[in-house]
Amino acid sequence: MANTLNYLDIKTVVVSCGTCYDALEEYHFENIFPGCRIIDIHEFLLEKGIKLAGKEGKQYLYHNPCHTPIKTMDGAKLASELMGQNVPLSDRCCGESGMFAVKRPDIATQVKFRKQEEIEKNLAALPQGEPVKMLTSCPACLQGLSRYQDDNNLPADYLVIELANSILGENWLNQFVEQVKNGGIEKILL
């Protein structure tokens, strides 16, 4: 990898998944790319000052993944800083945990019931009348949290996606894809 990519002088590797973060950390990037660091996308955005000043008419809860990519601070505190408003922690595992929900649905279903109880407690503690969305920093948890939407009308999304929708507009992904299709990014051939 170092021989293939050494001309890039990589200083920062930004990840969006705790499992990927931990796997890359084991590669000892500091030996391959001296001075290189690995950082979660959410921590990187906060470091760069990209955050909201609150979201009028919307409330959030934060689901902290069991295998979190956020390493420098508490996940709910980071979510609160990025969103510019209080984002309370919704505790307990969502029951997804990689292949857990597929390999052991009997146990994962029990975990889901405990998380559902926690969500109901969280929703009751929030001011009523404004929509609530669950945010997380893990792709697997996002999949797991989507299973709760039917039970309590609580949509879930990736924290960075909620930021992108707020800062760049709801159509940012389509615009990005069109830009890429029209030669709008640098191509690196390995």
Image (spheres, grey):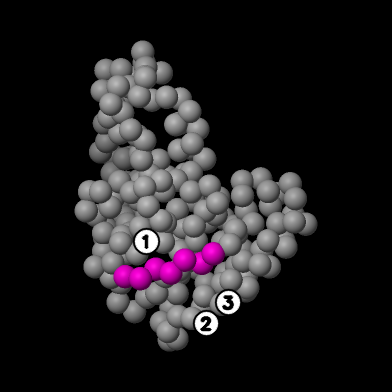
- For label 3, the SS is helix
Q: Hey, which residue is sitting farthest front in the picture?
A: 73
Residue under label 2: 124
Instruction: Examine the residues drawn in magenta and state their main secondary structure.
Output: loop
Residue 4: x and y, percent? Answer: 36, 16
The quadrant of the rendering that contains the C terminus is top left
Residue 33: x and y, percent? Answer: 32, 22
Name which residue type carries label 2: Ala
The quadrant of the rendering that contains the N terminus is top left
Q: Hey, which residue is sitting farthest left in the picture?
A: 49
Q: Are marks 3 and 2 in contact (CB under 8 Å)?
A: yes
C-alpha separation, residue under disc 3 versus residue under disc 2: 6 Å
The residue that appears at 51% across and 78% down in the rendered structure is 123
Q: Are marks 2 and 1 in contact (CB under 8 Å)?
A: no
Image quarter for residue 82?
Answer: bottom left
Residue 143: x and y, percent? Answer: 57, 55
Indicate left or right for 44 with 157 as reference.
Answer: left
Q: Assess whether residue 32 is covered by the magenta stretch.
A: no
Q: Assess whether residue 89 is covered by the magenta stretch.
A: yes
- Which disc number belongs to residue 121? none
C-alpha separation, residue under disc 3 versus residue under disc 1: 21 Å
In the rendered view, tell whether residue 126 sits above or below residue 79: below
- For label 1, the SS is helix
Indicate left or right for 167 with 29 as reference.
Answer: left
Residue 166 seen in render: no
Image quarter for residue 159?
Answer: bottom left
C-alpha separation, residue under disc 2 versus residue under disc 1: 21 Å
Residue under label 3: 120
- Numbered range of the magenta stretch: 85-91
- Which disc number belongs to residue 77? 1
In the rendered view, tell whether residue 182 sits above or below residue 87: above
The residue that appears at 37% across and 75% down in the rendered structure is 58
